Image (tube, helix red, strand yellow):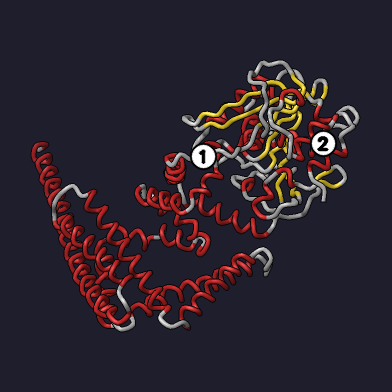
């Protein structure tokens, strides 16, 4: 299996006059864009690649092959721009490679290892980033009367298509071809995606078989020259350019994507569809502010943080209320669009707008706990997990049917069903397993109620009935949540009886309070109607 370094050695003795520029040459130059150069000024004179690259080739097979190659090592580099600004969240670099007289390759660097670079990637899905403007300005300042290829890998590929589709007709006419090597497309909520029509027939999109990053906001349906290449790596690591396979000097192509990555794409698309740009921004800010507050500079340090970093991230997500946004990912994983559909439905809006429904639910649950106190935890587990297993079975069957029973494409979904069903079976069979899991579910639910009540207390503007009711709920449900999780089985029924009593009383109070609120709203509405009628009658009398 041959890769980029092998291609470079095959073509080592050939200049671009001997063998014209190829798609694989585009990959080589896009990869070179990740390296550091000593040319710091945009107007610097062209310098031979061997003389201006800063990186040490020792141990780097790709760079060693490039520098030893006549085809690439003697290539000149100019117009090198590199900007790294933590404050403005900019990680940008671009350079011009001379292919031969009158023909150049303008390369944009993809995302590096820095937190700033990764944060900028996330920003593309909810706002325009500074690197996009810099890409447009760079092309406008560099493109002259010659011919140009424009390309890059990952974010660099995105900047190549973003920059070129914003050029005027005159400069765009000098762009010979554009290469987007597994980069995301234009976010429709941020950019005018119709601009892609200006460059669609002169653009090539190349993805690895296991494609994730290049699937975001993809334009594969409108760009006819889209290709899928084999990789010597597996999974998400196929994104790495150096792993892409070459066959006799050309890309080693396959017919379709890996089914597992299509499944991930569906989840990501559904998540983006269900999370508006403001929530995406809030979520990204929470995550990356946490990393930066911990003094982290690159993604490798994130994994070195271990459990402490995870703890800080969870804490900040809860405090900023972005945990709901994060929770939608496993929700999409298990339930697809089902939960989102319920959330957007009329019934959900009715329940959220009426405390009466909440009160009725609490009374029903409280009474069930009082009646079934001996087996309340076990029944909770059977209802919740059993419902999930049944849903997963129906959902998986539906997806398999839609894919014409393509088990390869839906294998991850089938694995999830088998895992959930196995866990459910083990919980039922193993002694006290249902009780332990039930305590965990019930305790977590009670702590969530306590936390929401606490937030309601903080946001309350008046010390009315609701204010004191939420204080009581915070204390009682927090205490019950902890008690449910730590109480042994022998004493559990007393906790369940206590909790059932509290929930029944809480439900009744909520129902009464909802009627009081409804009466006040009706009285206020009736009063406004009376005033309006009086005003109309007064005007009629004055007219007479």
**For numbered disc 2, what is the local secondary structure?**
loop
Badge 2 or badge 1: first in the primary sequence: 2
Q: Residue at x 51, y 38 (%)?
A: 297
The image shows residue 389, relative to residue 42, as above or below, that is: below
Q: Nearer the viewer, residue 418 or 178?
A: 418
Q: Where is residue 170 in the image (x, y as percent from the top left)?
A: 69, 21
The image shows residue 473, relative to residue 35, as above or below, that is: below
Q: Where is residue 149 in the image (x, y as percent from the top left)?
A: 74, 30
Picture quadrant of residue 182: top right
Q: Nearer the viewer, residue 424 or 541?
A: 424
Residue marked by disc 2 = 22
Q: Position of residue 89 (x, y in %)?
A: 50, 33
The image shows residue 333, relative to residue 140, as above or below, that is: below
Residue 124 visible in the snapshot: no
Q: Which residue is drawn at 42% across and 40% down?
A: 293
Which label was assigned to residue 221? none
Q: Residue at x 48, y 48 (%)?
A: 305
Is residue 476 rendered to the left or right of residue 267? left
Q: Where is residue 180 in the image (x, y as percent from the top left)?
A: 69, 39
Picture quadrant of residue 242: top right
Residue marked by disc 1 = 119
Residue 421 visible in the snapshot: yes
């Amino acid at each position: 299996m041959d890769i980029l370094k092998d291609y470079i050695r095959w073509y080592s003795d050939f200049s671009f006059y001997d063998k014209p520029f190829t798609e694989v040459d585009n990959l080589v130059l896009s990869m070179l864009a990740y390296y550091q150069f000593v040319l710091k000024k945009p107007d610097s004179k062209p310098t031979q690649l061997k003389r201006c690259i800063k990186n040490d080739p020792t141990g780097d097979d790709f760079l060693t092959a490039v520098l030893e190659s006549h085809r690439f090592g003697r290539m000149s580099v100019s117009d090198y721009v590199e900007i790294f600004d933590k404050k403005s969240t900019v990680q940008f670099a671009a350079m011009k490679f001379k292919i031969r007289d009158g023909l150049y390759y303008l390369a944009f660097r993809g995302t590096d290892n820095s937190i700033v670079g990764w944060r900028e990637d996330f920003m593309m899905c909810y706002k325009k980033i500074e690197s996009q403007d810099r890409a447009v300005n760079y092309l406008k300042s560099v493109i002259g009367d010659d011919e140009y290829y424009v390309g890059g890998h990952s974010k660099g590929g995105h900047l190549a298509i973003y920059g070129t589709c914003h050029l005027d007709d005159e400069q765009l006419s000098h762009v010979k071809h554009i290469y987007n090597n597994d980069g995301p497309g234009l976010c429709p909520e941020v950019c005018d995606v119709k601009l892609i029509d200006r460059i669609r027939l002169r653009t090539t999109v190349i993805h690895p078989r296991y494609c994730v990053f290049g699937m975001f906001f993809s334009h594969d349906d409108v760009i006819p020259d889209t290709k899928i290449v084999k990789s010597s790596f597996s999974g998400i690591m196929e994104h790495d350019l150096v792993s892409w396979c070459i066959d006799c000097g050309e890309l080693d192509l396959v017919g379709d994507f890996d089914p597992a990555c299509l499944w991930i794409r569906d989840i990501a698309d559904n998540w983006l569809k269900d999370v508006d740009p403001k929530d995406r921004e809030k979520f990204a800010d929470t995550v990356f502010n946490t990393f930066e507050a911990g003094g982290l500079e690159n993604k490798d340090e994130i994994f070195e943080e271990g459990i402490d970093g995870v703890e800080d991230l969870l804490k900040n997500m809860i405090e900023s209320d972005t945990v709901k946004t994060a929770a939608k990912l496993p929700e999409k994983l298990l339930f697809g669009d089902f939960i989102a559909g319920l959330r957007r439905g009329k019934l959900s809006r009715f329940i959220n707008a009426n405390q009466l429904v909440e009160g009725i639910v609490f009374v029903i649950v409280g009474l069930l706990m009082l009646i079934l106190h001996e087996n309340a935890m076990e029944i909770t587990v059977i209802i919740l997990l059993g419902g999930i297993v049944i849903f997963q079975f129906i959902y998986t069957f539906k997806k398999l049917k839609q894919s014409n029973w393509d088990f390869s494409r839906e294998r991850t979904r089938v694995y999830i069903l088998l895992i959930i069903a196995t866990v459910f079976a083990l919980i039922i069979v193993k002694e006290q397993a249902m009780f332990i899991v039930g305590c965990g579910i019930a305790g977590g639910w009670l702590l969530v109620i306590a936390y929401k009540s606490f937030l309601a207390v903080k946001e309350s503007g008046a010390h009315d009935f609701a204010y004191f009711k939420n204080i009581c709920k915070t204390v009682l449900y927090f205490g019950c949540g902890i008690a449910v999780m730590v109480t042994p089985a022998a004493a559990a029924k007393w906790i369940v009886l206590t909790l059932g009593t509290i929930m029944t009383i809480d439900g009744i109070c909520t129902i009464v309070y909802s009627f009081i609120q409804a009466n006040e709203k009706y009285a206020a509405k009736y009063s406004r109607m009376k005033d309006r009628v009086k005003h109309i009658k007064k005007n009629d009398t004055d007219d007479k």
